[in-house]
Amino acid sequence: MGGNSKAEGGRLTTHVLDTATGKPAAGLKISLYRVSGNSHKKLKDVVTNADGRCDAPLLIGKEFKTGQYELVFFAGDYLRASGVELPDPSFLDQVPLRFGMSEETHYHVPLLVSPYGYSTYRGS
């Protein structure tokens, strides 16, 4: 993958898998926020590519700072766009994941999603 592949410094990446279909969740919008107390500062919006990943790290280099963050995955929009019949209101719509990054290293925060459940973990 070109670009900054040095071990030093931190970076944040994610990907989304649709566990109902067993395929990457392409075209899913994600918002990234920095969280401080009750304050949320939106840093960026991205959309997953055909591989369910973002085209570049969400944070890297000077953008990366330790602290609390939140990723909001727009799962309901993705599921409706993929043709899944959902009740109104849908069980899952926006999926917020709040997490902390305490070291300048690689943090990978993936989402496994289906119409009625999701999970995450610290990946590599």
Image (cartoon, grey):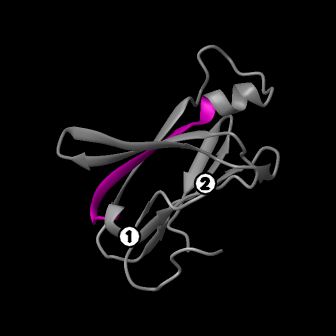
**Residue at (29, 71) in percent of width and height:** 102
Please, which residue is most extreme toward the left here? 37
**Residue at (56, 29) in percent of width and height:** 93
Q: Is residue 66 magenta?
A: yes
Main secondary structure of the magenta stretch:
strand
Q: Position of residue 104 (x, y in %)?
A: 33, 76
> Where on the picture, by quarter, is residue 64?
bottom left
Image quarter hosting the N terminus: bottom right
Would residue 96 appear left or right of 86 to someone viewing this image?
Answer: left
Q: Position of residue 75 (x, y in %)?
A: 61, 35
Image quarter hosting the C terminus: bottom right
Circles 2 and 1, Cβ within 8 Å, touching? The answer is no
Would residue 4 appear left or right of 63 to someone viewing this image?
Answer: right
> Where on the picture, by quarter, is residue 99?
bottom left
Please, which residue is most extreme toward the bottom here? 7
Q: Is residue 106 magenta?
A: no
* 3 shown above or below 115: below
Disc number for residue 88: none
Amino acid under disc 2:
Cys
Q: Nearer the viewer, residue 13 or 109?
A: 13
**Residue at (51, 62) in percent of width and height:** 57
* Distance in Å between CA atoms under marks 2 and 1: 16 Å
Crowd tier of the residue under label 1, counting other residues whose Cα lies within 10 Å: few below 14, some 14–19, many 20 or above = few
Q: Nearer the viewer, residue 101 or 11?
A: 11
Amino acid under disc 1:
Gly
Name the residue carrying label 2. Answer: 54
Task: Give the magenta-colored segment's residue range.
Answer: 64-76
Name the residue carrying label 1. Answer: 61
The secondary structure type at the circle numbered 2 is loop
